[in-house]
Amino acid sequence: MKAAPKHKPPSLETIDALVRIVGAEHAIRDETAMAPYLVEWRDRYRGKAALVLKPGETGEVSSILKIANETRTAIVPQGGNTGLVGGQIPFESGHEVVVSLERLNRVRGIDLASNTMIVEAGLPLAQAQQVAAGAGRLFPLSLASEGSAQIGGVLATNAGGMAVLAYGSARELALGLEVVFAGGLVWNGLKSLRKDNSGYDLKDLIIGSEGTLGIITAAVLRLFPKIAERVTCMAGLNTLDTAPEFFARALQDAGPALTAFEIMPRIGMEFVLRHGTSVRDPFPFPHQWYALFELTSPREGGELARLAESLLGESIEAGEIADAVVASSLAQGAELWRLRELMSEVQKEEGGSIKHDVAVPVARVPELVARANRLVELMIPGARPVPFGHLGDGNIHYNVSQPPGMERAVFLANWEALNAAVHEIVLDLGGSISAEHGIGRLKRDLLPHAKQKLEIELMRKIKAAFDPNFILNPGKLL
Ligand SMILES: Cc1cc2nc3c(=O)[nH]c(=O)nc-3n(C[C@H](O)[C@H](O)[C@H](O)COP(=O)(O)OP(=O)(O)OC[C@H]3O[C@@H](n4cnc5c(N)ncnc54)[C@H](O)[C@@H]3O)c2cc1C
């Protein structure tokens, strides 16, 4: 692991100047009060900071970055602190300043003709969804962390989640941004245009840059028609090998009505049934794999149920699936979703888990899983792969639970070696070592193996152009 970047601690004068910008009541200097900003939710990363600042206006963010740039003070932007790669947590030096966007959380406006809304970066994702629903529209980005994750955070990580298949990831859902750059300049890019071919797209560079190019302070988000009808189905499969054909058929038959297509293995279902509450196996017999998919429409009329029935009939006949259930009510649909949503949580109950968030072309998912499973058995005999996730996006969370009875720490000591070996397979299949969680600190050292030298060089040049003094989230991503 490369050493953490070296930064001088901000002087007392600098700290006082930064505190004055937001006011003492919105600055935290006390170690105990700072604690929630210095650890991520799984306790994988713990850091220290010289100060936590909570600006309430874009102008305050601008003043902070101006001083930070002049004094070479390192800044760590933080949203809801739900990121999974440690990007939002400062290093252990205690020299960095955390800038939390939580107070910058207003809704600036809704434009129903453009089907957009402008919200500030600190608005939690779930609240953005509610604002859209209140206006009779849908904001479709949906993650298990949506209660805490903020709009700035989901854009900075280009978050994906459950509805990418139909609506795209965060990048596709933002038409414009307001960003404060190192040095304090504010870019007002809050356009709500669907068409804008006027040169390099700065918005697309900032989205997914994990706080290393600028601080997002507001965004123009796309809205969609509200869902009026929803049909949730689960299919049981004898093998993962037929899942890509089943998915292709579903996509062909349902087109844009297919809004989610997830898979999970039998062992994952067993974990959920063992540790989850209010859950039951929807099938009378176990299946090796399960595919959960959803059809939605902005119109009512029962068409989706007929579509699901005919799709499932054809797929059973073609041997792609063995059995299927169609939820007959929204409550039953929610029960099926619960089986999928508990998949991460229940793995904790089975001891240590080594995780991978990877993507490969959809058709190669079975090959990925088969090759990785063989590798796991060779490297850690008895370890239990639990690969699950967004098959429709080729995005698999290839998690591996420890062998029963093994010392947790002994198992977790394999983390880096297993990651490296699984990532090698992923790259061989033309995939990505980070499908939706980003690079942050966790995968920073893997990036040179996963990207071409040319790409890394260009990324470094882009970083230097935006942030010549390397004050924005140094040591993350690059
Ligand atoms: C239970 C759970 C489920 C999850 N499920 C998914 C999933 O399905 N799909 C998925 O893609 N992700 C998922 N995630 C991870 C996901 O990345 C985060 O939930 C979310 O995108 C991060 O938002 P946040 O506000 O918490 O950002 P933080 O964690 O605070 O920050 C994340 C990164 O963004 C930067 N950042 C934050 N705010 C700003 C800003 N305003 N300007 C510039 N940079 C900023 C930070 O510096 C950091 O590098 C999950 C996380 C959890 C805990």
Image: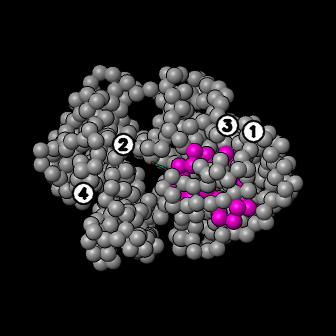
Identify the amino acid type marked 3: Arg
Question: Which mark's residue is nearer the viewer, 1 or 2?
Answer: 1
Separation of marks 2 and 4 at Cα, in angstroms: 21 Å
Which residue is more in the foreground, 304 or 47? Answer: 47
Q: What secondary structure is found at the residue carrying circle 4? A: helix
Instruction: Name the mark nearer the viewer: 2 or 4.
Output: 4
Of callouts 2 and 3, the N-terminal one: 3
The residue under label 1 is: 25
Mark 4: amino acid: Ile
Marker disc for residue 260 = 2
- Kind of residue indicated by mark 1: Glu
> Mark 4 or mark 2, which is nearer the start of the sequence?
2
Splitting the image into 4 quarters, where does residue 90 fall?
Answer: bottom right
Left/right of residue 278 with respect to residue 298 in the rendered view: left
Q: How far across and down, in percent of the image, does residue 223 sit?
A: 53, 31
85 part of magenta stretch: yes
- Mark 1 or mark 3, which is nearer the start of the sequence? 1
Image mark for residue 103: 3
Q: Nearer the viewer, residue 78 or 429?
A: 78
Write down the quadrant of residue 386 in the picture.
bottom left
Determine the main secondary structure of the stretch shown in magenta: loop
Gap between marks 1 and 4, in whole Å? 50 Å
